[in-house]
Amino acid sequence: MSKQLIFGLFLLLSLGLFTYTLFRLASFFRLTRKGFKVDRIGERITTTLLVAFGQTKILRKPVIGLMHALVYWGFMVITIGSLEMMIDGLAETERIFGSWGILYDFITASGDIFAAIIILSCFAFLARRHLMKVKRFSGVEMTTKSNMDATAALTMILILMFSLIGMNTGYLVNHRDDIVGSYPISSLLTGLVSVESAHMIQETNWWIHIVLIFVFLNILPYSKHFHIIMSIPNVFLTDLKPMTQMNNMASVTKEVKLMMDPNTAFAAPAEDAPPPERFGVKDIEDITWKNYTDSLTCTECGRCTSVCPANITGKLLSPRKIMIDTRKRMNDRGPGLSKDPNFDDGKSLVGDYITAEELWACTTCNACVQECPVNIDQVSLIMDMRRNLVMEESNAPKELVQMFTNIENNGSPWQFSPDDRMKWAEGLSLRT
Amino acid sequence: MEEIERLSEENQPQATNGAFHVPTVAELKAKGEEPELLFWVGCAGAFDDRYQKVTRDFVKILHKVGIKYAVLGTEESCTGDPAKRAGNEFVYQMQAMKNIEMLNGYNIKTIVTACPHCFNIFKNEYPELGGTYEVHHHSTFLQQLINEGRLKVADGGEFKGKTITFHDSCYLGRGNGIYEAPRKILEALDANLVEMRRNRSKGLCCGAGGAQMFKDAEKGDKEVNIERTEEALETNPSIIATACPFCMTMLTDGVKDKNKEQEVKVMDLAELIVKANNI
């Protein structure tokens, strides 16, 4: 079989598998609720350019942020080369973009340099994970799988980059006289490759590189590194509201309006009225599509948890865990729920995965939302879970129940008489 | 009735000729008038012993500048924010609808408040329920008065060279992007403004947001307000400036816990301006 045919089959198989996985994940969106409207497209594009492509939020930690940004920008350039490799593989050409002239020189040179930068960064990342004790890499939600995920991904990226440089070096020796493109790093290594082995080295590394790209692509949706695919869409789909703005529940508005209108206050509900939607989030069918997108995008970096005032002071709440649990719950219950809308495994997201104690520790300070490099909104989901605890389960700390009563009776969260609201104004005078 | 009270107040022996009365919207309405500005006092501003002082100082400034303002007095009622953040959307929306009905009934257009939680909910959450107003937090409002030259800040006075650190309220800063106005006020006081390690968008919460003010904290190894107070004290300030009633309570408690209440005062921006100007 020719290289063309083998490569064509391989490409078909891996893209087919990847498409199947994406459809499977996408089908879970049907289980989720409506969220906010995706409008203000111009603002979304700006946000995406800044936060995703510009890496502005990851750069809030300048040193490690810059390393991530370089890896990300490197991936962007190298992806052009991967696309070329795919066309080359299918069309049995070599460096088909070579006709682009100086632009091709620029792309290959920056790809070659970025490959070296990515190698250095990945070694630094591995060292941070395994040799240094970085606090945010630990926590109850950080399972062995999560840590293995990270190590596996970094190893794969390293092999990808080594094979790229190997391929370029083999190419340089193999094509001594008719080189297209520019390879500043690989050209330093040509002395290591003999003329006889050059073709073999180029070909072997080509295959390693292209096969690994597609293996990696198919592993991504099952690992925390799915953020490579999800980050840009998730940033584009950011809820553009001010961070501390909490949505008004439309179902409650309707009921409150009925209660305040003397004509309808005591009327029985219409018989054909649909059953009321559950208040807040108890399980996976109550989350919005954005909550689910957030959970798929989370790469468990822990920047949210490292700035959470509750977590810093030893409470159970970890915003990262909220995202991990949501994703896990969808994986556990989504398949059954897709087949049978009444599927019940006797568990729920709130209660069995996330405890009330975690939810009550949130101060809604939004430091987690501020720090998330891919614009995940942990606080809205936490608040929706609280709503369920209070409005469906009547499960609020007793001081808060007292506070509700105070507001209802006295119009103040404290037990003061509304008649005393002007006491502060007694005896006021300006110095003259 | 109010008129009699006002007169009797003016006749009190301790009252100097600087004594003044805080008008309510209802009083103005009875005279066929409307305020240009509603000062929303907030529950902490009305009932909390410590924050009442801030409320009093803020109206002194309003009075001094000569703005036609009024308060709602006994008609004011909780915005519903603590209930909402504690998960009780019903109590919140009942409060919101009642408040909106009253505010719209009085034809209120502009609101100023010294509470970031009231500010946030008026600005971001009431409009959808039919309550759209121009809303100011007192920090930006005061800064604007200084900018316009309507409020003079005594130069070289009370706070010259004193070390002040400013604690960002989450609902002001991260929530609504107000970071610089409070700092500009402190700079206008000629104070030596020092920043905590975590400031502005990286500021650490005082621990009271999200209805935590009204409940005990969950089990942990430290209180959030202690963590924040320690950070504030690292800057060796003579004053920790705040712009939120909850932050003020939390940090005041923190400073007391560290036995530093003699050396370090927790003060609101309005109080600092009143003190600097001897209003």
Image (cartoon, coloured by chain):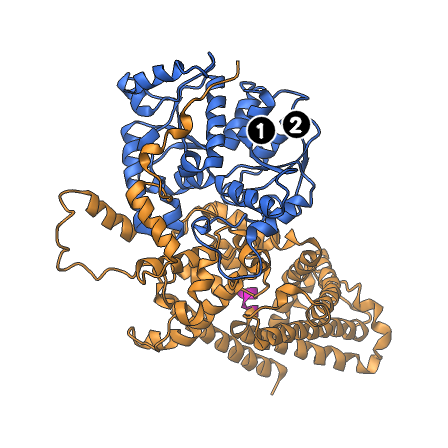
The residue tagged 2 is B159
Tell me: residue A339, above or below residue A415. below
Task: In the picture, one chain is orange; tell me its letter.
Answer: A
Say which chain tag 2 marks: B
Q: How far apart are marks 1 and 2 (CA)?
A: 8 Å
The part of the chain drawn in magenta is: A225-229
Tell me: residue B253, above or below residue A178. above
User: Which is the main secondary structure of the residues drawn in magenta?
Assistant: helix
Helix, strand or loop at label 2? It is loop
Dot 1 or dot 2: first in sequence order is 2
Q: Which residue is drawn at 23% across and 45% down?
A: A257
Helix, strand or loop at label 1? It is helix
- The picture places residue A245, in percent across and down from the top left corner, at 43, 46
Where on the picture, by quarter, is residue B26?
top left
Q: Characterize the local packing of mark 1: few (<14), some (14-19) or many (20 or more) Cα atoms within 10 angstroms.
A: many
Task: In the picture, one chain is blue; tell me its letter.
Answer: B
The three-letter amino acid code for the residue at tag 1 is Leu
Task: Locate the N terminus of chain A by quadrant.
Answer: bottom right
Where on the picture, by quarter, is residue A150?
bottom right
- The picture places residue A271, in percent across and down from the top left corner, at 12, 59
Residue that lies at the very extreme toward the front in this rendered image: B13
Q: Do the residues labelled 1 and 2 touch (CB within 8 Å)?
A: yes
The three-letter amino acid code for the residue at tag 2 is Phe
The residue tagged 1 is B272
- The picture places residue A129, in percent across and down from the top left corner, at 68, 70
